[in-house]
């Protein structure tokens, strides 16, 4: 029996996944078009409560059983939902039909007790009163059957699942795969999951299923349930306005991350995305859960972090981030330049490393003043580069010359460059044989060299020479 059900389950997942591949559908966290306003949607909102009646719900939560707290608070919420126009409710329960026996769990123990419909509030309350928690936790299969539950309804609408559970999948199936398939096929929007006293190690397993809310005690559960139902009825939307140098929301194409404030993990599996202008030329709309505070990171160079961002529920929010940018162009101008690929340290405030950019590239930075330290020989310093206003700022680095050096023997010393009337060491010799070819920036140089075997200071050789851009220079100490 179980083997047949398992085959049917896998076949259903395969069919749903195939439908996803054949259906054009973007990520649900970012929805194009004007923001949805509460009350503007003429379609129905259908909420299917998927309720955990497994044996673990009999465990105590403070001074009361989880089951008693969850059923009482859900019943109270049902009273507040009575008479809302366009709202239809249903109830699916799992784990209530077969008593849990270790190693013999009934993975088909899931049932639609109240079909989705209008005015079912009282019926759902009555069903909750007569239920007893006793079985296992077939979450994936319950979500899969939800597709059939919504199929029994008629007309356009927004299909929402609210899963209330204190445990993880117990039947070796994949709730994440089911959820993705149902969302991809357009059967449901991203589910809401309320975890009742879940262990920390299990919480992350639900983030791929949907919008996860952690209820650690009775008071938190009551507050979270209210938030989830409110969110199910009214989208809380936001747009991230990346402001340019004129404070207009015209910057875009920036990776964005959204986190719950002070949380160790992300809000959901879709918390990372690239900022996009929609077909109306405005920042794309995001559907967010109205958690108390968010942390929003715009991954510009350097990044901009907005802490303690408050989202107002049931309305459209604007999150403004100062992100005026410009381009730093380190193009060399020559296809076969010796400078191609040389690394440049881009810094702010004297020594704060912002980015490492290679010569030959063009990179976007936040508006500001930058210093460059370019790994030529010797190091090239460029101070006070002003970037911003959407403009491209070119920084030209002169082509090096080529020094052919022949000392004939190992030794000490080095090559010095004259800067502001002082000699600065540009290339040290540390006992090796420095004979070879060097690409060196244009300028006035001095070579100081003593052979390793020479034991007299007066045997140090000093040669002055000039390096010119793109020109060869030969220095032979054996002549």
Image: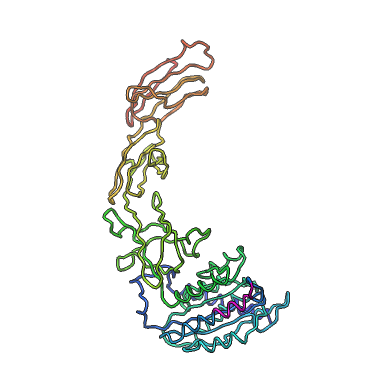
- Using residue 432 as the reference point, say whether residue 279 is left or right of it: left
Main SS, magenta residues: helix
Q: Provide residue 274's location: percent of width, then percent of height.
A: 40, 60
Q: Residue furthest front?
A: 63
Instruction: Report whether residue 18 is seen.
Output: no
Answer above or below: position of 282 versus 81.
Answer: above
Q: Which residues are magenta?
A: 63-73
Q: Residue at x 55, y 86 (%)?
A: 125
Q: Quadrant of residue 371?
A: top left
Q: Residue furthest left?
A: 246
Q: How many marks?
A: 0
- Using residue 168 as the reference point, say whether residue 42 is left or right of it: left
Taking depth in this image into account, of 188 and 57 the one nearest to the observer is 57
Answer above or below: position of 52 versus 372.
Answer: below
Q: Quadrant of residue 57?
A: bottom right
Q: Is residue 68 magenta?
A: yes
Q: Provide residue 37's location: percent of width, then percent of height.
A: 35, 75
Q: Provide residue 105's location: percent of width, then percent of height.
A: 69, 77
Taking depth in this image into account, of 378 and 37 the one nearest to the observer is 37
Q: Provide residue 154's location: percent of width, then percent of height.
A: 45, 88
Q: Quadrant of residue 476?
A: top left
Q: Residue at x 52, y 60 (%)?
A: 265
Identify the coloring.
rainbow
- Using residue 305 as the reference point, say whether residue 398 is left or right of it: left
Q: Quadrant of the N terminus?
A: bottom right
Q: Is residue 134 magenta?
A: no
Answer above or below: position of 34 versus 250.
Answer: below
Q: Quadrant of the C terminus?
A: top left
Instruction: Report whether residue 140 is seen.
Output: yes
């Amino acid at each position: 029996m179980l083997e047949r059900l398992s085959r049917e389950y896998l076949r259903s997942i395969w069919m749903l996944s195939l439908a996803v591949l054949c259906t054009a559908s973007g990520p649900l966290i970012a929805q194009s078009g004007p923001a949805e306003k509460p009350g503007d949607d003429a379609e129905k909102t259908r909420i299917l409560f998927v309720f955990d009646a497994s044996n673990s719900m009999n465990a105590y939560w403070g001074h009361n059983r989880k089951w008693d707290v969850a059923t009482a608070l859900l019943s109270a919420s049902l009273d507040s939902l009575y008479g809302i126009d366009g709202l239809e409710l249903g109830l699916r329960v799992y784990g209530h039909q077969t008593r849990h026996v270790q190693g013999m769990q009934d993975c088909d123990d899931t049932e639609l007790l109240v079909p989705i419909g209008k005015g079912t509030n009282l019926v759902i309350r009555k069903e909750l009163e007569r239920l007893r928690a006793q079985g296992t936790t077939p979450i994936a299969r319950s979500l899969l059957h939800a597709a059939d539950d919504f199929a029994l309804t008629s007309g356009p609408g927004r299909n929402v699942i609210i899963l209330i559970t204190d445990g993880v999948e117990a039947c070796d199936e994949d709730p994440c795969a089911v959820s993705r398939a149902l969302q991809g096929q357009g059967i449901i929007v991203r589910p809401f999951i309320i975890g009742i006293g879940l262990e920390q190690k299990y919480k992350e397993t639900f983030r791929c299923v949907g919008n996860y809310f952690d209820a650690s005690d009775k008071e938190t559960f009551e507050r979270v349930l209210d938030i989830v139902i409110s969110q199910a009825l009214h989208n809380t939307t936001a747009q991230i306005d990346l402001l340019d140098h004129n404070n207009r929301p015209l910057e875009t194409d920036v990776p964005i991350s959204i986190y719950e404030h002070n949380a160790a993990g992300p809000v959901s599996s879709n918390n990372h995305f690239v900022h996009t202008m929609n077909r109306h030329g405005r920042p794309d709309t995001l559907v967010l859960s109205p958690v108390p505070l968010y942390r929003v990171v715009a991954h510009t160079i350097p990044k901009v972090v907005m802490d303690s961002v408050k989202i107002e529920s049931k309305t459209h929010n604007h999150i403004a981030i100062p992100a005026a940018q410009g381009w730093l162009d380190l193009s060399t101008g020559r296809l076969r330049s010796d400078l191609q690929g040389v690394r440049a340290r881009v810094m702010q405030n004297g020594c704060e490393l912002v980015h490492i950019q290679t010569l030959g590239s063009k990179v976007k930075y936040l508006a500001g003043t930058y210093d460059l330290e370019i790994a030529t020989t010797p190091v090239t310093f460029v101070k006070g580069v002003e970037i911003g206003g959407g403009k491209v700022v070119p920084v030209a680095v002169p082509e090096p010359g080529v020094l052919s050096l022949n000392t004939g023997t190992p030794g000490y010393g080095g090559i010095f460059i004259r800067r502001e009337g002082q000699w600065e060491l540009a290339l040290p010799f540390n006992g090796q044989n420095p004979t070879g070819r060097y690409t060196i920036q244009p300028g006035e140089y001095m070579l100081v060299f003593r052979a390793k075997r020479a034991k007299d200071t007066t045997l140090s050789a000093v040669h002055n020479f000039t390096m010119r851009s793109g020109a060869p220079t030969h220095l032979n100490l054996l002549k």
